[in-house]
Amino acid sequence: MTVSIWGRLFVWVAVLAGSLLIVVIVALIIQFGRRGSTETGSAVPGQDEVAAVGAGPAAGLVGAVTYHPAEVAVQRLAAETHYQQWLEFPGRVRPKRSTRLGFELGGPLLEPRVEIGQAVAAGQVLAEVDTRLLREQGRQLEFQVARAAAMLAELTAGPRATTIRAAEAEVAALAAEAESATNRRVRQAELVRQGAVSEQEFDTVLTTEQAILKRLIAAEQRLAELQEGSRPEQIAAQQALVSALQSEQASLKLQIEKGTLVAPFAGAVVKQYAATGQVLGPGQALFDLVETAALEAHIGVSPEVAAQMKLGQTYTLWADQRSSTAGLERIVPIVDPQTQTVTAIFGLQPGQDQLDVWMPGRLVRLHWRAEVAEAGYWVPNDALVRGRRGLWAVYELAEEPQVASRTTDVGAAEIEEPLGRVWSIRQQQVEVLHAEQQRSYVRGTLTPQAWVVVAGGDRLLDGQRVAPTQVIPAGEAAADGGR
């Protein structure tokens, strides 16, 4: 009795589980049937109808599903031989001149006269180093130059007249003394022959005469030199000494001048490398100076675009949604190995109200409209659907099979007016060559002059029947009502 009750209970549970399984399967079938109906193109939800053909069980139930064609918007393809696209090339604003300033000669840095960010004029003093030692050397050189110049003037002017007269008087006195000494020697020689004077006394007189004669010769030579003036060699040597001292003096003056750092052009100080009191070495950097009045834009463009540019022509550059005209001044004739671009240099002339935008270091852009020689078609972006293998595709109108069987073979390219008829569609694979905001330039297996679906294609399947309700002119995007 117990076994029978448990057996019956098991049978009831099994029957109940089987019933639930059947209900779930039927619900799934109905759900998938509705989804398939939607995907195959019912124009409006609620218009899909399931019609039962046949009458009663005797005749049998024959189910036939009837779908209304999907309403779409179409556009006729127009073949193109090329397309235009906007290319954007970035670059930066740079000062026309920039330099790193420093002293040629070292020394302790005095208090700089400018600060970072300050605008300076050409020739304005920026800083100085301590040059007191050089100035002291300059004063010493002044004394040496004065002394050498005085000696040169003396040599050039020659001896004074009083000096010459004194030398002449000395020569005359020595000549008279020499004549007297000669007469004494003659007399002493006669006395020696007579034995009245010893030879020792005679030698004394002779020695005295010779000494006087030598003094006379020396005096005559000095007189001759005085009368002739300074020798050319002496004057030339003194002149060379004066020139050397003056050159040294000029060099020292130049060193003192180089102890003052001046701005070579008008601009702004953007960096400082040393502080007051720091001992700077020769050539050590102190300031970075950039020219703010004359700016350039250095933009890297492709070699093909550079070949189309013309020097002197005006172009429009953009920075932060603001534009400024710039003339092309130079093109660097070399390709950058890293970016594979050619540097085009534009001269900027921004207005006074744009100086806050066009500053050195600012990013700028050049917009260039390029023409690409490539055959293809313009289609609205809404016409593109996902094709096979991740590619893009479009739906092209084809003859509806029932219509084609009763008429002559008419290709899609020969359709003049697609409205008012039902068509089948076929998917054509395309390659997007260029994309814009509302349209794309494509190429692929499209039929020339064919009609393509430009709205509602995301709900269609290959081979589905459609009913065009709107013709979109070429070059225009489909209206939202055709989606």
Image: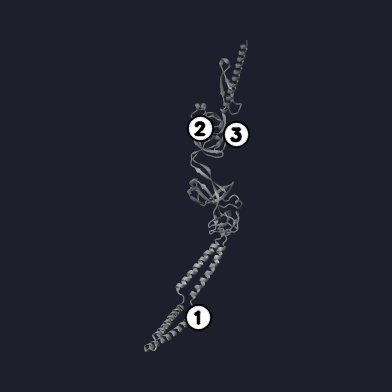
Residue 412 in percent (x, y) is at 50, 32
Which tag, 1 or 2, sits closer to the chain's start?
Answer: 1
Amino acid type, mark 2: Arg
Residue marked by disc 1? 162
- Viewer-nearest of discs 3 and 1: 1
Q: Residues within 10 Å of mark 2 (few under 14, many from 20)?
A: few
Left or right: 114 as drawn, with respect to 194: right
Give the residue drawn at x 53%, y 63%.
254
Task: Provide the secondary structure element on which disc 2 rests.
Answer: helix
Inspect this view and state whether residue 166 appears. yes
Separation of marks 3 and 1 at Cα, in angstroms: 128 Å
Give the percent coordinates (x, y) of residue 314: 54, 50
Rendered-image quadrant of the N terminus:
top right
- The image shows residue 413 at horizontal and vertical percentages of 50, 33
Mark closest to the chain's N terminus, 3 or 1: 1
The kind of residue tagged 1 is: Thr
- Give the structural element (helix, strand or loop) at label 1: helix
Colour logic: one colour
Q: Residues within 10 Å of mark 1 (few under 14, many from 20)?
A: few
Number of other residues with Cα within 10 Å of mark 3, as a class: few under 14, some 14 to 19, many 20 or more? few
Q: Up-down: is 155 above or below 404?
A: below
For the residue labelled by badge 3, is the local secondary structure a helix, a strand or a loop? Answer: helix
State which quarter of the image contains the C terminus.
Answer: top right
Q: Tell me the distance, in whole angstroms, between the alpha carbons under discs 1 and 2.
A: 123 Å
Give the numbered dot on residue 481: 3
Q: Which residue is mark 2?
A: 389
